Amino acid sequence: MSGKPTKRNYDATSRRAAAAATRERICAAAETLFLRDGYARTSVRAVAKAAGVAEATMYLAFTDKPALLDAVILRAVRDNPSEALDAIAAAPTPDVLPRLAASNAALMKRAGRLIALGESASLMDAELRPFRDQAQGRLRTAFRAIADRTAEHRVH
């Protein structure tokens, strides 16, 4: 034997899974409270209680209440049956607008109330504006790609 201690590999898979499950529980509780009580009347303490976690855990998972609302909106946008905008942009030109309309309808059914809540809350809470601006920038970029794609195939 060399006398050197053997370095063990640390596998954090289960720890990451537990953290993701906790974040999911927090987001689900926050979504319920934000939609029921509004952004301003929903406290981080109330979300922690509803999610069954300590308030300190909330701040480990999300830096602040605006970051929590952003995560809740992103979760709703992600967890819906809408089609990805890049897939729509790659579709045959005659299919682009009908697919975009169907995708947007599915997205708004799942996330519309949360997006509207985020928009109105950003008028009162300046810390929400960078999240809103980033989301709107991503949306403009995606819609620009769709507009460019359809413009390429316009019949003159």
Image (spheres, rainbow, N blue to C red):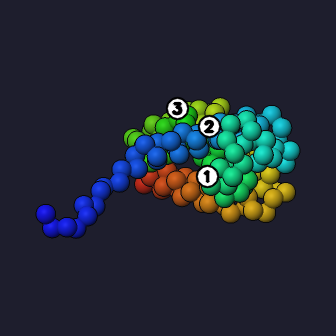
Instruction: Point out residue 11 in the picture as x, y percentages from the top left corner.
Output: 36, 50
Q: Which one is closest to the eye, mark 2 or mark 3? A: 2
Is residue 110 placed above or below 133 in the rendered structure? above
The CA span between labels 1 and 3 is 26 Å
Is residue 119 placed above or below 79 in the rendered structure? below
- For the N terminus, the quadrant is bottom left
Q: Amino acid at mark 3?
A: Pro
54 with respect to 97 (left or right): right
Q: Which residue is mark 1?
A: 61
**What secondary structure is found at the residue carrying circle 3?**
loop
Q: Which residue is mark 3?
A: 81
Q: Which residue is mark 2?
A: 25
Quadrant in the picture for residue 8: bottom left
Tell me which residue sits at (52%, 53%) in the image. Answer: 142
The residue lying toward the viewer, choosing from 12 and 154, is 12
The residue lying toward the viewer, choosing from 6 and 124, is 6
Taking the image as drawn, is residue 16 in sight?
Answer: yes
Tell me which residue sits at (59%, 32%) in the image. Answer: 106
- Asked whether disc 2 touches disc 1, contact meaning CB atoms under 8 Å apart, the reply is no
Q: Amino acid at mark 1?
A: Ala
Taking the image as drawn, is residue 140 in sight?
Answer: no
Tell me which residue sits at (45%, 37%) in the image. Answer: 95
